[in-house]
Image (spheres, rainbow, N blue to C red):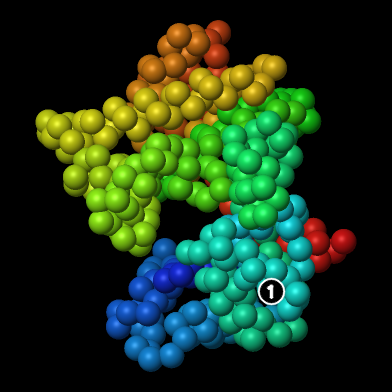
């Protein structure tokens, strides 16, 4: 067994994803998901040799700890536990405090918890997952890898809001950006495709999943990104509204909506789900659109239009552009959405290669534009590999 195995944990408020990553090959030798935490149907599932297994969690007790304990037992059953050298944790929000991966100790845990106001759905859950993992693996070094870290290279003109400096100084209100590990990974892979050093490469990275963001990458560094103070800003997403006139919030509050109702509406009931009235799943949207559903058609058109607008605006942040990169669940797999986005970008010279676009799906990378036209490509993301690799590098630093 390899001595380069890192257990990667992504702990959410009601779920916990995990993967055992070989940092040499980048392969996930084991992966799984704990879900429905806090509910009677809480369960941990995983795949081994293509076969799915499930373990129900006790209705009572700490489901995060139970899930981690089940993962430990699974690793012991498979003879893998003794080969793990570190545990890497995904953390959504590092604020301005954390600009790179750090080793976790009590002080780091406290700081991550203190940033919970910036990511109330994520950071508290990360801390719970970290404590559970530290209890389960007391002898292993554990590391926090931050979604926001890659975007710390943004210039002030990109991250500063057009608000009083007092709000920034007192509360840290600014653009932070997320999906940093994904944008980092695909930009490095894209540089290999175009055969240029990453330090000389310029991309617009388009991460399209249930959460979605665009990142302008200049000479390998993030110089602007669409998500903001929280992951709610920017693109239209599965259930999130993206950019919105803030006066709408005041308007709804005056209409008698509670703060929580407004928050839930914009985060959980908007985006593809809200516009279509059907689903937040891109596949369901396209299927309904093909069957003539007006709401699904509008959701598809709106989504693709907004992505294309962001891509066009992010050309301003770059002196030159080597390629547009599509990644994540929708970006990697939805040929119709990529096709429509490229059509919306025709003023910039983008022309879809239909065969290339059809082939770049289900884990296959590839260029999806015609020769001698501006380049767009698909690069499958691998955030777990980034988390594992950075943990390993710090372990050996």
For the view shown, which residue lies furthest in the left direction? 292
Q: Position of residue 255 (x, y in %)?
A: 25, 51
For the view shown, which residue lies furthest in the front direction? 254
Quadrant assignment for the N terminus: bottom right
Tell me if I can see residue 48 in this picture: no
Identify the secondary structure beneath mark 1: helix
Q: Position of residue 121 (x, y in %)?
A: 48, 64
Q: Is residue 107 above or below residue 215?
A: below
Q: Which residue is mark 1?
A: 110
- Depth check: give the residue in front, 380 or 146: 146
Could you tell whether 221 is left or right of 60 in the image? right
- Depth check: give the residue in front, 85 or 232: 232
- Depth check: give the residue in front, 355 or 209: 209
Could you tell whether 15 is left or right of 41 in the image? right
Could you tell whether 133 is left or right of 350 in the image? right
Q: Position of residue 158 (x, y in %)?
A: 65, 33
Tell me if I can see residue 253 in this picture: yes
Quadrant assignment for the C terminus: bottom right
Q: Residue at x 25, y 56 (%)?
A: 256
Q: Residue at x 37, y 53 (%)?
A: 267
Count the labels in the image. 1
Q: Position of residue 203 (x, y in %)?
A: 63, 27
Query: Which image quadrant is residue 61 in?
Result: bottom left
Q: Residue at x 75, y 83 (%)?
A: 139
Graded by Cα atoms within 10 Å as few (under 14), some (14 to 19) or many (20 or more), the crowding at tag 1 reads few
Q: Is residue 362 above or below residue 117?
A: above
Q: Residue at x 37, y 79 (%)?
A: 38
Query: Which image quadrant is residue 395 in?
Result: bottom right
Could you tell whether 50 is left or right of 283 in the image? right
- Depth check: give the residue in front, 215 or 246: 246
């Amino acid at each position: 067994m390899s001595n380069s195995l890192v257990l990667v944990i992504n702990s959410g408020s009601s779920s916990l994803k995990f993967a055992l990553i070989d940092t040499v090959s980048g392969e996930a030798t084991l992966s799984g998901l704990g879900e429905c935490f806090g509910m009677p149907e809480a369960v941990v599932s995983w795949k081994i040799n293509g076969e799915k297994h499930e373990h129900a969690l006790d209705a009572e007790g700490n489901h995060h700890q139970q899930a981690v304990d089940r993962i430990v037992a699974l690793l012991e059953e498979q003879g893998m536990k003794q080969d793990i050298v570190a545990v890497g944790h995904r953390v959504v929000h590092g604020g301005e405090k954390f600009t790179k991966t750090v080793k976790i100790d009590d002080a780091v845990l406290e700081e991550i918890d203190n940033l919970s106001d910036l990511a109330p759905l994520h950071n508290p859950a990360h801390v719970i997952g970290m404590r559970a993992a530290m209890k389960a693996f007391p002898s292993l070094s554990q590391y926090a890898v931050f979604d926001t870290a890659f975007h710390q290279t943004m210039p002030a003109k990109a991250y500063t809001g057009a608000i009083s400096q007092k709000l920034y100084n007192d509360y840290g209100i600014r653009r932070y950006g997320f999906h940093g590990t994904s944008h980092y990974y695909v930009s490095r892979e894209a540089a290999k495709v175009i055969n240029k050093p990453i330090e000389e490469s310029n991309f617009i990275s388009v991460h399209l999943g249930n959460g979605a963001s665009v990142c302008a990458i200049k000479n390998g560094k993030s110089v602007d990104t669409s998500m903001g103070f929280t992951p709610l800003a920017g693109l239209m997403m599965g259930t999130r509204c993206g950019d919105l006139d803030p006066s709408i919030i005041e308007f709804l509050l005056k209409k008698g909506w509670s703060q929580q109702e407004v928050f839930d509406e914009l985060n959980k009931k908007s985006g593809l789900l809200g516009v279509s009235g059907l689903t937040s799943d891109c596949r369901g949207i396209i299927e309904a659109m093909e069957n003539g559903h007006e709401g699904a058609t509008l959701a598809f058109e709106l989504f693709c239009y907004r992505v294309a607008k962001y891509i066009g605006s992010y050309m301003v942040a770059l002196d030159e552009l080597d390629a547009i990169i599509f990644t994540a669940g929708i970006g990697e797999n939805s040929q119709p959405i990529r096709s429509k986005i490229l059509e919306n970008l025709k003023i910039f010279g983008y022309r879809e290669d239909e065969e290339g676009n059809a082939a770049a799906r289900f884990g296959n990378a590839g260029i999806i534009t015609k020769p001698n036209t501006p380049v767009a490509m698909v690069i499958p993301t691998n955030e777990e590999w980034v988390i594992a690799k950075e943990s390993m590098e710090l372990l050996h630093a």
